[in-house]
């Protein structure tokens, strides 16, 4: 389990994390999402022990992570901007990772060689951005981490390799119970792999739930007729006679209240993770605004 309890971090006058609490259950695939500048990467650098918090607690498996080599050996981390030594090739980095991680799996490295098909003797700095991301994932997954933390892991990858990487993540979770935290702006892909989601904004945790609970507690109501009473409406739009309401509540509850209003037509639909993200942040002035050009 990964936990951040009431963590605060400031850089000068800027408060990057503001009483942030985050919980990733053991064996979960957790999607950390939020707008640019929400503090996601700062939170990740605390979870990996790079930053020391100004206040609060950060633990991995119940142990503090900062300046704790024993815990850090269990964590695989791929940052948004990957780094390699200037002259290092893939084989050089394999030796480096093997020295840092006692559980490095050379058998898995050989098994995945054909999957990634990267030139082993070419300096990694000469790889394209997408190939560098592939190398980072290739090396990191071979450390057999108990915890895998990924910051924009598929950025720069082609669609086939994106699917391959996500498939390897899910296989690792299924076979080894790996705990995974993924920060990404690609909410459609997160929706396919995550079972828990946290939405951050301005350094705070705005909403944190299992994906099933999140999608079950916010729905889209489309109707022709008067707006039902007693609904917790996050967003409302109209196209001709058809009203579309984004409503916080269980589908059966919203259906009951809609039926009581006796509209000419109504339907209750589930929301995608992307829609939940937009409308939840709409409550803090982040909704898509109509602009006349």
Image (cartoon, rainbow, N blue to C red):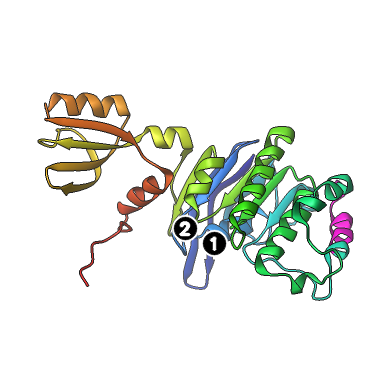
Who is closer to the viewer here, 96 or 108?
108
Q: Please state, as top left, top right, bottom left or bottom right, where the N terminus lies in the image.
A: top right
Who is closer to the viewer here, 142 or 38?
142
Classify mark 2: helix, strand or loop. Answer: loop
Magenta residues?
93-104
x, y percentage for residue 283?
A: 30, 51
Q: How many labels does the image show?
A: 2
Q: Do the residues labelled 1 and 2 touch (CB within 8 Å)?
A: yes
Whether 252 is drawn above or below 28: the answer is above
**Circle nearer the N terminus (1, 2):** 1
Classify mark 1: helix, strand or loop. Answer: strand
Task: Classify 10 Å Cα crowding around label 2: few (below 14), some (14-19), many (20 and above).
Answer: many
x, y percentage for residue 258?
A: 18, 29
Q: Please state, as top left, top right, bottom left or bottom right, where the C terminus lies in the image.
A: bottom left
**Which residue appears at 80% of the width and 51% of the height?**
114
Horizontal side, residue 201 vs residue 158: left or right: left
Asked whether the viewer can see residue 150, the reply is yes
Horizontal side, residue 248 vs residue 124: left or right: left
Whether residue 87 appears in magenta in the rendering, the answer is no
Q: What is the distance, in whole Å, between disc 1 and disc 2 at their CAs? A: 9 Å
Who is closer to the viewer here, 156 or 209?
156
In the picture of the structure, the residue carrying the numbered disc 2 is 203
In the picture of the structure, the residue carrying the numbered disc 1 is 9
Asked whether the viewer can see residue 54, the reply is no
Magenta segment, principal secondary structure?
helix
Of circles 1 and 2, the one toward us is: 2
Task: Classify 10 Å Cα crowding around label 1: few (below 14), some (14-19), many (20 and above).
Answer: many
What's the mark number on residue 168?
none
**Which residue appears at 69% of the width and 66% of the height?**
82
């Amino acid at each position: 389990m990964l936990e951040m309890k009431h963590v605060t971090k400031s850089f000068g006058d800027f408060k990057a994390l503001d009483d942030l609490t985050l919980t990733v259950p053991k064996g979960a695939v957790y999607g950390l999402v939020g707008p640019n500048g929400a503090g996601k990467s700062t939170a990740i650098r605390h979870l990996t022990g790079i930053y020391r918090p100004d206040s609060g607690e950060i633990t991995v498996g119940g142990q503090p992570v900062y300046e704790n080599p024993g815990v850090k050996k269990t964590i695989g981390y791929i940052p948004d901007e990957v780094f390699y030594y200037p002259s290092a090739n893939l084989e050089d980095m394999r030796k480096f990772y093997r020295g840092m991680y006692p559980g490095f799996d050379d058998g898995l490295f050989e098994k995945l060689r054909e999957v990634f098909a990267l030139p082993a003797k070419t300096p990694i700095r000469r790889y394209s951005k997408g190939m560098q991301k592939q190398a980072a994932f290739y090396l990191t997954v071979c450390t057999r981490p108990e915890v895998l933390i990924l910051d924009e892991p598929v950025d720069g990858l082609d669609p086939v390799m994106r699917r391959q990487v996500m498939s390897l993540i899910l296989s690792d979770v299924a076979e080894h119970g790996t705990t995974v935290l993924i920060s990404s702006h690609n909410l459609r892909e997160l929706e396919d792999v995550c079972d828990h989601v946290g939405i951050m904004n301005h350094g705070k945790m705005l909403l944190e739930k299992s994906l099933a609970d999140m999608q079950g507690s916010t729905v889209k109501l489309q109707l022709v007729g008067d707006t039902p009473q007693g609904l917790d409406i996050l967003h409302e739009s109209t196209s001709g006679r058809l009203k579309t309401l984004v409503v916080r509540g269980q589908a059966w509850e919203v259906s009951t209240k809609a039926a009581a209003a006796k509209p000419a037509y109504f339907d209750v639909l589930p929301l995608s993770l992307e829609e939940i993200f937009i409308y939840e942040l709409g409550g803090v002035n982040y909704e898509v605004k109509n602009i006349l050009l």
